[in-house]
Amino acid sequence: MDAPTTTSGENGIAGEGGWFTPHKAPSTPPPGGDQETAEGRRPAVVRPVGRPTREGTARPTSDAPAAHPTPAAPVEQPAQAPPSSPPIPEPAAAFEPSRPAATSTEPERVLPQRSAPPVVEETSPDALAVRGTMAEIGPVADKVTSYFYALLFVRHPELRPMFPPAMDTQRDRLLKALLTAAEHIDNKPVLVEYLQNLGRGHRKYGTRAEHYPAVGECLIGALSKYASNIWKPEIEAAWVRAYTTISQVMIDAAAADELRAPAWWHAEIVSHDLRTPDVAVVTVRPDQPYPFLAGQYTSVETPWWPRVWRHYSFASAPRSDGLLTFHVKAVPAGWVSNALVHRARPGDVIRLGPPAGSMTVDHTTDSGLLCLGGGTGIAPIKALVEDVAEHGLRRQVEVFYGARTDHDLYDIDTMLRLQQSHPWLSVRAIIDQLAHLQLPDAIREYGPWNEYDAYVSGPPGMIRSGVHALRDIGIPSNRIRHDSVEELIVVGN
């Protein structure tokens, strides 16, 4: 989710102060007092349930979901099925929604997550209502999201500055968020972690508790207009309950995170290495300590495109000097990627959101690592290799580095130097145009991989085919970590 709306899934409920009143007393009166819905009536009033805002759970070192986002609209940082995460409080009693997702105009490289089968529970009535609504609006999804934002900006013009100038990407994010929520509405562990990450990530947009009621009211106004064939009080009540709980989880997570971390970090570019005409390795120095784990990613905003954030994976394990490195590929119409590759120079200052992602190494086991990295997806793979080296365990690590041409193997020298330094590391370059063999297929010729944990990073198509190939050769789903294809949250690839 990108902003304080349901771009990533929120909840709200009506109370005496208006719609979806959050538990945290707003510092300013919540927007949207007595607004009517698109049909000229207010949605059903439901009282919110949940924990006080300040009781949110602590933010794990991996803030995932980044999300990704822009204020007041759902989504930024992708839901992720966590490999292992600290216990999280149950969401408000009346809820079992699902996690939202997002997309953007820049190339889609998805956010990290472990591929694991969803927790199967009996489908709840609210889940049926939410999924039924999403199926109904599917053919006119673009109209629904456009109408939602029109309602939001007309009724609450003070929220418009929180969003980027161009709204095309934002509309996509809202739809992805709703689809993700509908998909996982009965999988509370996945949903709650995703929402907590979104709540933390949305702090950088200036999202506050009092913004959620306005978003919820306009969301239901848009849904009721375009799902009028099936809309009835029971469905409206289900959406109100869902949005109420979602928003409370996000509000709680943001409040807890506020006690321990800034909403964003300023970072000065100290090195800009143009490896190819469209790929740059950018190193930055944060203005204060920036804790993260190898394999994670963050969101980046440049001074040339305010309020436009894109996700990039860290290309190294945490360093003693505190520097952070990213691999950025400029893509057509990619505002942030083109600015970072062609315009940024040492001395420029960018902003970073919190770290996110669960594509990290489990150091409690000695299983081998099978890593597939395509294009700039080699960045987090390199970070994982460094992480294993720093822990001093001689775990076998097999890296398959995929590219269309040898020209695209922009970081092969670095990977080969790592291989020379660590006998437990093996690096294989797979070049499509030379071998006439795609990366996922290449792994079938090696192995066996039964005792390995697999990591996949790269473009969405490669992620999908890679995961499929890994399952085909017998690697269990719960041992495959990858960029989340469902979220398709834009990353610089």
Image (cartoon, grey):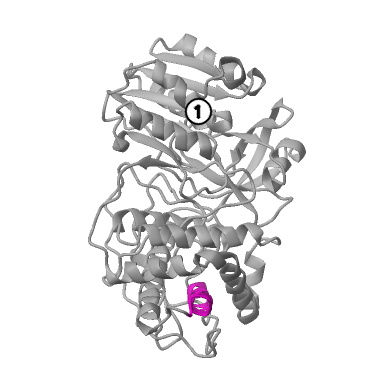
Q: How many marks?
A: 1
Q: Nearer the viewer, residue 99 or 203?
A: 99
Above or below: residue 296 compared with residue 127: above
Above or below: residue 11 compared with residue 287: below
Q: Indicate left or right for 282 with 314 as reference.
A: right
Instruction: From the top left corner, tell me how far across and down residue 481 is, in percent.
Output: 38, 36
Q: Residue at x 67, y 20 (%)?
A: 407
Q: Which residues are magenta?
A: 210-228
Q: Residue at x 61, y 40 (%)?
A: 492
Asked if residue 295 can be seen in this view, the reply is no
Above or below: residue 449 compared with residue 144: above
Q: Residue lying at the far left in this picture: please name it.
A: 122
Above or below: residue 29 compared with residue 330: below
Number of residues whose C-alpha sits closer than 10 Å to that of mark 1, classed few (under 14), some (14–19) or many (20 or more): many
Q: Residue lying at the far right in this picture: please name it.
A: 343
**Residue 206 within the magenta-colored segment of the rendering:** no
Q: Which residue is mark 1?
A: 373
Q: Nearer the viewer, residue 248 or 98?
A: 98
Quadrant location of the C terminus? top right
Badge 1 element:
strand
User: Mark 1: which amino acid?
Assistant: Gly
Task: Please tell me whether the stretch drawn in magenta is mainly helix, strand or loop.
Answer: helix
Instruction: From the top left corner, tell me how far across and down residue 236 is, in percent.
Output: 40, 79
